[in-house]
Amino acid sequence: MPRGDGRLSHELLPGEKGPQDSCGVFGVWAPDEQVAKLAYFGLYALQHRGQESAGIAVSDGANVWVYKDMGLVSQVFTEAALDSLHGHIAVGHTRYSTTGSSIWENAQPTFRSTATGHLALGHNGNLTNTHELARRVREREGSNGELPLGASASTSDTDLLTSLIASHPDLSIEAAAMEELPQVQGAYSLVFMDETTLYAARDPQGIRPLTLGKLERGWVVASETAALDIVGASFVREIEPGELIAIDEHGLRSQRFATAEPKGCLFEFVYLARPDTTISGHGVHAVRAEVGRQLARECPVDADLVIPVPESGTPAAVGYAQESGIPFAQGLVKNAYVGRTFIQPSQTIRQLGIRLKLNPLREIVAGKRLVVVDDSIVRGNTQRAIVRMLREAGAREVHVRISSPPVKWPCFYGIDFATRAELIANGLTVDEICTSIGADSLGFVTLDGLIASTNVAKDRLCRACFDGVYPVALPEPEMLGKHVLEGIESRVTESERTVVLENDGLLIQGGGAAEALNFP
C-alpha cells in the first residue's frame, strides 16, 4: 500500500508552518486486551500532536516488538500489522520532530537492549542539555563497547535518553530511570516499557501534559484525556511533575525523582491540545471560549458577524460572539483532507495560496463587517491571505482578533515555532502588524487575560513564548536547535536486528541477550 511521506501536515500555506507540537505518547497495560489496537486508536486521538511518523511497541512478557514508519497513523498501520503485534503492554508514539531530522531512524518508540531485557520508549517534549547527555552516552560507549548512540543513525534527544536508561548493567529499568531522570533537563513526558512493566514519567516542571486512566482490566497513560476517552478509559489523574509510575501484574506504584515545580505549557490551552481534552482540571474548549469572551471585553469592535478561522479559532470565536452580542457564523470552510502537498505547485496554483484549504462562504461574508478570530499569529502570512480572500469575497471590513498574546519568543520545550527573527510580533507593533496583514483593525488578548481564563495560577504556567521567561535554564545558543545532534557520530547496535514485514513499515524484535549471537 502507499506509504506516508512523513511530511504531511495541516499547514495552510506552502512554507507557512504553524506552531507544531513535538509528539503524542500513549501507553497501555491490559492483559486479555488487543493492546496494539488500543494504542492505534489512542494515537489516532493524538494525531494532531505530530504528523511525521508513528509507531507502536508491544510486549507479550517475553519479547518486545516495535513497528514504526513515516506518515500518519492511518498510513503506517494496517489491520495485518496490528494483528501481528500480540501482547499485554503497548507503547505508542506520533511524532513531530523538534530535535533530529524527520527521518525513519528518528521515529519512535526508540528501542534498546538492556542487561535485563529490552526497552522501548516514547517521548513528548524537548531536552535542553542534549550535549551533556550525548557526552555521557559516548563515555559509556567506551566503557563497555555495547551502547550505541543510535540504533539506526538516530539523532534525537529521545535516543540519548533511551541509551542512558538502558546503559546500567546492574540496575532494573525502573532503578535506572530513577537515577538518570534527575540529570535530564528540559521538557519530557515519557511512556516506556520493558517485557513486563509499563512506565510513565514527567519532568519536574510538568511542561508537557501526561494523564493516567483506568480500564476495566488495565491502565492507560496518554498525552491528553481525549486519548483516554477514545479507548474507553476513565480519567484518574495527571501524572505529577517529577513523578515516575510503574504498572505491572502487582498493580500501580509511584515514586518521585524530583520535587515538583509546576510550569505547565500555556500554549496547550491556546492551540496544541484538542478542545475535548482536560488540562489541570479545566476543559480546553471552555477555557478557549472564556478567552474569546475576555478578548471581546479587551478588544471590542462594531461589526456584523464573528467568524472563526477553523478549527482552532472556533471556541474563542463562539466566546467572542457571546460576550459582544455580535452574531456568530461560519464564514470560512476548511477542507479537512488536505495536508501539505509534496507536488510542487505551479505559479498559478501558488497564487491561489490558502484557497486549497480554506474558502469563504460568499453569501455569508459579502457586504458584512467581519470579526475574524484566530488562535495565534506567527509570521502573519496566513492571516494576510485570509484577509485578502475575505475582501475578494465582498467583505466590507475585516477586523482580526487573536486569542493569544503576540508570540515573541521561540519555544525550546517541545513546540516548533518560527525562529525569533521570523516572528512578526518580535519586530512590529500591533498597528504595524495590522497594516502588514491588511486588516481594518487588530487586537490580541492580553497575557493576564489569557492566564485568568485558564484558572491556573500564573506561577504554575510556562509563558516563555509570550514573555521570554524560560522556567528551565537554556544552554548556549549553538547548543540549541532541531539539528543540534546531527553531527554526532552514531553506530548500529549489533544486538538489535531489523526485518522487513511485508514491505510495510519495519518490525524490530529483541529476543533476549542469549539469542543475540544467533542473529545474522
Image (cartoon, rainbow, N blue to C red):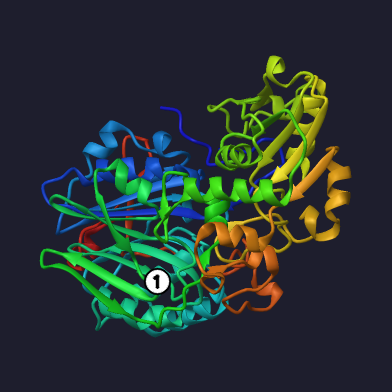
The residue that appears at 45% across and 67% down in the rendered structure is 188
The image quadrant of residue 84 is top left
Q: Residue furthest top?
A: 363
User: Looking at the rendering, in which quadrant would you find the C terminus?
Assistant: bottom left
Using a 10 Å C-alpha cutoff, classify the residue at mark 1 as few (fewer than 14 neighbours), some (14 to 19) or many (20 or more).
Answer: many
The quadrant in which residue 493 appears is bottom left
Please count the marks in the image.
Answer: 1
Residue furthest front as drawn: 325
Query: Where residue 289 sits: x, y (%)?
Result: 54, 45
Q: Is residue 464 above or below residue 101?
A: below
Q: Is residue 322 left or right of residue 296?
A: left
Q: Is 75 placed above or below 158 here?
A: above
Judging depth in this view, the residue of 16 and 241 nearest the camera is 241
Residue 174 in sight: yes
Q: Residue at x 64, y 63 (%)?
A: 448
x, y percent for residue 347: 81, 25
**Horizontal side, residue 504 vs residue 85: left or right:** right
Quarter of the N terminus within the rendering: top left
Visible in this render: residue 97? Answer: no
Q: Name the residue type under label 1.
A: Ser
Looking at the rendered structure, the secondary structure element under dot 1 is helix
Residue 376 or 504: which is nearer the viewer?
376
Residue ID for mark 1: 163
* Residue 503 x, y percent position in the rendering: 37, 35
Q: Position of residue 101 (x, y in %)?
A: 58, 55
Q: Quadrant of residue 442?
A: top right
- What residue lies at 54% left-to-right and 80% top-to-bottom? 132
